[in-house]
Image (cartoon, rainbow, N blue to C red):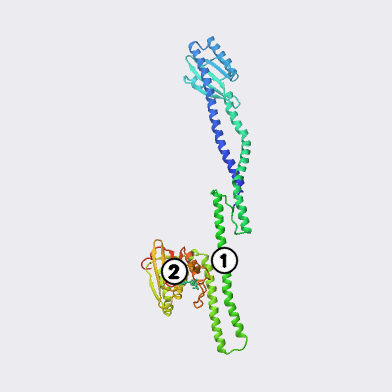
Amino acid sequence: MRRRLPLRLAWTLRYTLALLVTVSIFGVFTYDQIFRRTEEDAQIVLDLQVDQIGEVVARSDAASPAVAAAVERSVSVAESDFKLGLQVFDASGNLRLAAGSLLLHPLDLPEETRAGSTRPVWREHDVGDKYPYLVLTQPVEGAVVQGAIYTRPFVRNARDVRDIYLYSAPVLLGLTALLGYWLARGSLRPLQEINRSARRISETHLEETIPTTGSGDELDELANTLNEMMERIRRGMDRTRRFSANAAHELRTPLNALRSRLEVTLEKEREPAEYRHTLQELAREVEQLSDSVHGMMRLAQSGAGLSPEQRVPVDLDALLRECSEFFEPLAEEAGVALDVRLDAGAVVPGDASWLHQLFANLLHNAVKYTPAGGRVELSTETQGERVAVRVRDTGIGIAPEEAERIFEPFHRVGARPDTPGVGLGLALAREIARAHGGEIQVESAPGRGSTFTVWLPHEGPREAGD
Ligand code: ADP
């Protein structure tokens, strides 16, 4: 399994990353906006200066003193705030006048202006540092005015903002990481509490519960879920404990009886007929013991549920018919009428031998606990996605307070020493029904009879010819 970062660290990293992304997007956006505006500012200033000179040139001549004075004035006024250069060319492209910073970096006329174009031309002139000159060449009547402006004073503000972002990034990152760590620790504290409680409970006291705050938030929900899980585990363990104790008791009593019977028989020499009689009785006892052990094993198996390969389509009516035919001789012997009405035609996904065991247990009980002259009825009926199998008898019935307990392993109502059985039949029936996604219910009235109903999910009717 891939090893994962501790949650606290992972959350801290996530918080930091989220903030970093937000700040970066914001930073890039603001820098871009400021940069664009300052560039526009430089263009506006240059445009204004070139326009002014252009007007003077248009009124007089490229070589007139008025133009020279205007150029000088513009350059000297501008020079205190930013570097500006101005040049004036005559109609044939000869330089007539140059003033300001441009003298250091003489500029030529662009090709298209030389070729006679009258459109203004914008260019950038690289002077070897990271801030270029912005150059505007503007043809006017009989001359060309060219201006250049150093972009540094304009762009510098935008770059300053960018530098502030860049230099403060590590500090911001550190602060976010700290804040993220603090937030993550706070959010995880209740989870750690739950973990501590759960560990204490699993180590020692299973009956304790994880404290809840009653806020109904996700962590409270988790604590409640864990408490419910613990409760189910506790109940399961109780059941297992009771089952083992009962099983041990159930095996010990007949084993003790067997042992004392053997000891008494072996105390002295006996007639062969007496030995035979004793051995026959012992064989019956051993058979009952083996029935108990067999029942316990089946119960343990069915409690683990059905495996996928055990789940095959079972024709329920056919299975029940076979089962009832098996009990016909027993019912006849007991003087009980067996009435079978099977017409649901349902196919149940499951294990045929387990289902056979389930219904055999119910039918056997119905015959066993119905006095001579009574009736046992086996019927099926589909209701939506489920099929109901009913085993109804007119037997001795079950008292209401016993109705749930009869499904517990080894529970037998009252002392019925005359009826054989170990009290595992119904427990097994219920486990098998549950393993098939179904349920078993009982309705009964003492002296009037009982109805056991098994509900099972089915796959619809059996196909014709099956
Ligand atoms: P067993 O029949 O071996 O005692 P079961 O688990 O099959 O064990 O049944 C548990 C108890 O439920 C029985 O001892 C009996 O008292 C009662 N019981 C089961 N089926 C019926 C029935 N059809 N009529 C009356 N009592 C029943």
| Eye-nearest disc, 1 or 2 | 2
User: How many discs appear?
Assistant: 2
Per the image, the residue denoted by label 2 is: 444
87 left or right, relative to 327: right
Residue positioned most to the left: 464
The quarter of the displayed image where residue 383 is located: bottom left
Earlier sequence position, callout 1 versus callout 2: 1
Quarter of the image containing the N terminus?
bottom right
- Image mark for residue 240: 1
* Dot 1: element: helix
Report whether residue 109 is seen: no
> Which of the two residues, 14 or 125, is positioned nearer the viewer here?
14
Question: Which residue occupies 50% across, 17% down?
Answer: 51
Q: Is residue 401 above or below residue 277?
A: above
Report whether the residue tagged 2 is closer than 8 Å to ligand 1: yes
Q: Type of residue at label 1?
A: Thr
Residue 456 picture location, percent across and down? 44, 64
Question: Which residue occupies 57% across, 39% down?
Answer: 19
Residue 427 picture location, percent across and down? 50, 68
Q: Type of residue at label 2?
A: Ser
* Dot 2: element: strand
